[in-house]
Every structure is written in structure tokens, then in C-alpha cells.
Image (cartoon, rainbow, N blue to C red):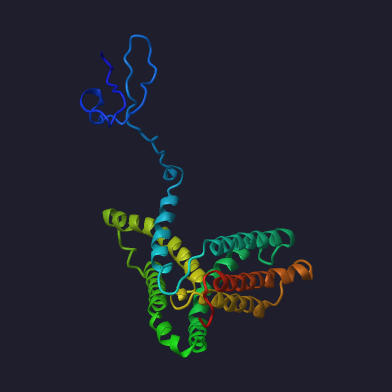
Amino acid sequence: MATGGWQPPHNPGQGGGPYGPPPQNPYYGPPPPAPYGVPPQPPGPYRPAPVRRRRWWLASPLIPLVRSANRAAKRLFDKEGGGRVRDQLVDKVQLTRTVLGVIASLALIYMYGTEDGWSGAATDGAANLFVTPFLLLLTGPLVVFGFILYAPAHRRPELRSRLGGPLKTVGWYVLILAAFGAFMYVVGQTTLLHGLHGVMLFVVGLPLMVGLPWTLVFLFLSSAYVARSAFNTAYVHAALPPVLTTVLVWLIALFNLLPDGLPDNGPLAAQLCSVFGGPLSVTALSLWELRRLRTHHGVTIRG
């Protein structure tokens, strides 16, 4: 009798015929129902649904540029290893605090305004982002040195042996800033490119049109990674980034407060929030991170 490709289930107690070795077809069981006159067929192989690829680059050519710059910045300035402890909850809380801080700053500016308007606020924010790595370069060695001295004597050689990671990060950042400064000097202050015409102008100008935006995005993201990881000082000890971050935010607050004092717009409570709200929230988050390192990961400042 024709079975249309279907074979009865394997019976290990008998051999030969339809009850011999198991068939190659993966379908074991009763045949599926079929229309009259059409022999039943086993189901074919499973085929997953095709994955729809996101074509964001069609909407904006800046998206692949930002992604490429982000990959390069993360590869250089957000490395694993050493004493680093990855905690997803801490990362999420830090991101949430950053977003809420930006929203709060924008709300204060919208309600009470600023002396220089929105452009001045944006300029101050960008200046703080690029000033942060330089303040880290000045204060970071002192904090790291004091941190190592505070550790038990038997742990100091191990901590000193891990200084290579942060030092490489500092070297890369300084080298990139120096190369970018030299490049901008050559482009803006010399006549090296003024004598180019025709094909040579196109050959030189096209890479500049693509490379300059990529470099600016790369510098911005690199500064953000450096400020967040404190030059990868978690290589030395997992508790160093929150300690350095706390010191750094208060230095930035003093850096903004000493020249001009409190802002003139809004009531006193709004002025105090605009100056001290960020440092206080960062300090509270750093203390919580240190407590979580101790309670969930067994990492203490002296441990």
C-alpha cells in the first residue's frame, strides 16, 4: 500500500519492513490529514522567519558615522580587565541619573533662563565635558597614589602592577588630542591646502569632509568614556572610579562657581540646585555604588 512517503513509527521489538530501523524522516507519529486522493506528506524542515535588517543609514548618513566612532572610542577607552567589576544595575542607574540630570538642567534653563541663553548653556556643557579629562589628569594621580597607600601593605604591589591599563588610556587620550590640535593648526593656520586645485583639491577635500565630522564625534565620545571610566582606573581597583568621580564633580562645581558665583536667574533654591544638585546626586550614587560593591561583590576600599 502506498503511504506517500510516510512510514509507521519504529518498533524496536521487530526488524525488517516498516518496523525495521528508524526512517531518516524526522516525523514519527500518525500522518497528518490530507485531502481526498492526495497521499499524506511529512512536514518539511523548519525554516526560520527572515530577519529584517535595520536600514537606518538610509534615513541619516550620520548614524553609521556615529556607530563607527563609538566602536573606536569604546575599544580604546572602555576596556575590561584588572579589578573591574561589571554591574548592570549600576550602569542603568548611572544612565538614568545622567538623563534626569540633563532634563533637570534643561528645565531650570527653560523656567529661569541663563545669562547667555541656550547657546551659552550648550557651550558650558561642552566645555565641562572636555575640561573633565584634564582635571582627571591633574587630580587622578594624587587620588590613585593615596588609594594605594591606604591599601594594606601586601596588596600594594598588586595594585601598582595594574597601573599599566590607566596609563595606556591616558597616553592614547593625550596623543589623540595632540594629533587633533596639530591637524586643526595645519588646516586653519597654514597655507598648505590653499594651493590645491582641480583633482588634488577633490582628493584631499573629500576625506576631510568625511574625516572631520568623524573625528569630532570620536573626540566627544572619547571624552565621555574617559570621564565615565576615570581613565579605566577600575583596572587598579573597582572602587577607584566612584571615588574619583566624587572628587571630580566637586572640583568641576568649584571650577564653575569661583569665577562668577551663583547664577543670577531664579530664586535661591533654583540657583543652589543648578550648582550643587549635580555633585550631590553623583556623590549619593557613588556612595551607593561603593556599598553595592561591598555587599554584592565583596569589594572594599582596602580589600
Q: Residue 82: horizontal and vertical position, in percent?
A: 41, 74
Closer to the camera in the image, 252 or 180: 252
Query: What residue occupies the far top of the structure in this picture?
Result: 37
Residue 296, image x, y percentages: 55, 69
Q: Quadrant of residue 73?
A: bottom left
Residue at image point 66% right, 63% down: 105
Task: Using the image, determine if residue 120 lies above or below residue 151.
Answer: above
Above or below residue 109? Residue 295 is below
Q: Residue furthest right?
A: 267
Q: Where does residue 239 sit, x and y in percent of width and height?
A: 52, 76
Q: Position of residue 270 (x, y in %)?
A: 75, 67
Q: In the picture provided, is 250 more to the left or to the right than 209? A: right
Q: Quadrant of residue 170?
A: bottom left
Q: How many marks?
A: 0
Q: Is residue 117 above or below residue 55?
A: below
Question: Quick one: which residue is furthest to the front in this view?
Answer: 13
Q: Residue at x 48, y 86 (%)?
A: 148
- Quadrant of res 11: top left
Q: Work out which residue is located at the far left of the displayed protein and give it.
A: 16
**Residue situated in front as seen by the camera: 109 or 202:** 109
Q: Left or right: 151 with respect to 71? A: right
Q: Nearer the viewer, residue 288 or 122?
A: 288
Q: Residue at x 44, y 44 (%)?
A: 56
User: From the viewer's perspective, is residue 160 above or below residue 218?
Assistant: below
Quadrant (top left, top right, bottom left, bottom right) of the N terminus: top left
Task: Give the residue drawn at x 30%, y 60%.
Answer: 196
